[in-house]
Amino acid sequence: MSLKVAVIGSGPGGLASAMLLSSRGLNVDVYEAAPQVGGRSKTWEQDGFRFDLGPTFFLYPRVLEELFEACGRSLRDEVELTQISPQYRLDFEGRGRIDATPDIDDMERQIAKIAPGQESGFARFLDDNRRKLERARPILERAFPGITSLFAADVLRAIPHLRPWSVDSELKKYFSDPLVRIAFSFQSKYLGMSPYQCPSLFTILAFLEYEYGVHHPMGGIGRVSEAMQNVAEQQGAKFHFSTPVTGLEFDGRKVTAVNTEQGRHEYDAVVINGDFARVVPKLIPDHLRKRWNDRKVEKARYSCSTFMLYLGVEGLEEQLPHHTIYIPETYTEALEAIEPRHELHENPPFYIQNACITDPGQAPAGHSTLYVLVPVTNQVGQINWDAEGPRYRELILDRLEAFGIRDLRSRIRTERMITPADWESKYEVHQGAVFNLAHSMDQMLHKRPGNRFEGLDGVYLAGGGTHPGSGLPVIYESARISTNLLFEDLGVPGDHSTADKQNNDVKQGDETLKMGSDHAAA
């Protein structure tokens, strides 16, 4: 009889898990509370306009390509990916702009225009981060079940790159000008963190953009989620939509069944893909979660949130590139308003996606979709969004018009607004923290919830709330790590390289600790 596995949630981590599990012949049921796949990585339609709900582009498609290859498919055959050029525009209020490109000569010319003398750091930044990524890859592609994992040989080689200072501080090696550092550090917001707090490892985020490009899936990010669903279904996975899981059953510490409103369903293992702090406490009793009990979950640090406007407008926004990031003169103060002050700022940075410049099918003819994201505090700030939401909408529309989007209000034909309170209440995001647990040094590697959930048998995690963290490439990687552990635990034939590496490293770590103890005793 084939092994049965339940996947709870069909966000990117759940979809990747379903693909990998079904590719090895397991009986896979995917339970999704919503009526469609994707979680926040979906595309939705309103009045003929199509919008991405959350992520709007792909970095580092290698991981996703490998997932499709593991299923005997080609990502490029299933999804049309277009590399964006320029990858984005950085508009610095009062100091010019940069149209980001991997062309070193072009980038150096643009950097020199806004900060003469800083351009020589760009090539050095790329070279150093190329080496950093090569060293860091092992720690992003393996499980970290405990502190002994840190003593594996490849991890020890990567540890020097986990320097205990910020992305901004690390960039001072290349750029003395604070504005230029912002151009290579704003990417910390992909993790929901300030570059003045985000660990220095994550300078690799900007490097990935220049080395591998920024990609747009034609039709929207939801096309990728739909392609992943199709592959999983063709391999036998079954999707159960509008079917929230109400609880898990355990025999001691071994998961045995999934409960839904339709009944009780027995499984050999369960993969949980959902917002960690919202889903796990609902499904697993507190007494079974010794490391991540309710008290620990509440005390953990979480990412920022976002204030969103999705605008379907009349007219073609030909003056805007596909991606624009606005950096106000008050950038540092605006980030401090998010954390530690947990306040709203009146001149915040914002991001605009103008998808129709690349993908005109996202709107009716002669119209455009504008996706506007403003980083804001999560719900720790206790902001009354019922009152502040309409006011902040007006403020952001004013900022967009001042930025150069002419007559915006009069041209809006359809609209949706999402606040941090909406992320929490309507989309099951704890504290509205859309980038999940913060990526601080005390919540990384073995200090993050484990891919094989600690202290339980048969429970695995995939998504931004486990290792390696948030962002589409690493969420897909989390699913690969977790399913490899599952295969090894259940004796599924095939390649268990991640699990085998982990077990060997634990043994190596134990030996290292033993040697250290023996040395201390001597």
Image (tube, rainbow, N blue to C red):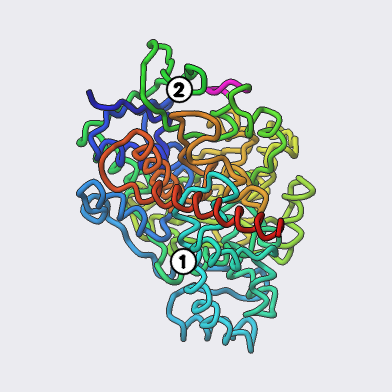
Q: Residue at 50% x, 46% y: name it.
A: 311
Q: Position of residue 42 (x, y in %)?
A: 40, 41
Q: Residue at 30% x, 41% y: name it.
A: 20
Disc on res. 78: none
Amino acid carrying mark 2 in the image: Val
Q: Which residues are magenta?
A: 282-286
Q: Earlier in the sequence, mark 2 or mark 1?
A: 1
Comparing 89 with 400, the one in front is 89
Amino acid carrying mark 1 in the image: Leu
Label 1 crowd bin: few (<14), some (14–19), many (20+), radius 10 Å: some
Tag 2 secondary structure = strand
Disc on res. 255: 2
Comparing 356 with 292, the one in front is 292
Q: Is residue 283 magenta?
A: yes
> Residue placed farthest to the front in the image?
522
Depth check, mark 2 against mark 1: the one in front is 2
Real-space Cα distance between discs 2 and 1? 39 Å
Q: Position of residue 406 (x, y in %)?
A: 55, 58
Prevailing secondary structure of the magenta residues: helix
Q: Quadrant of residue 277?
A: top right
Residue under pointer 1: 208
The quarter of the picture where the N terminus appears is top left
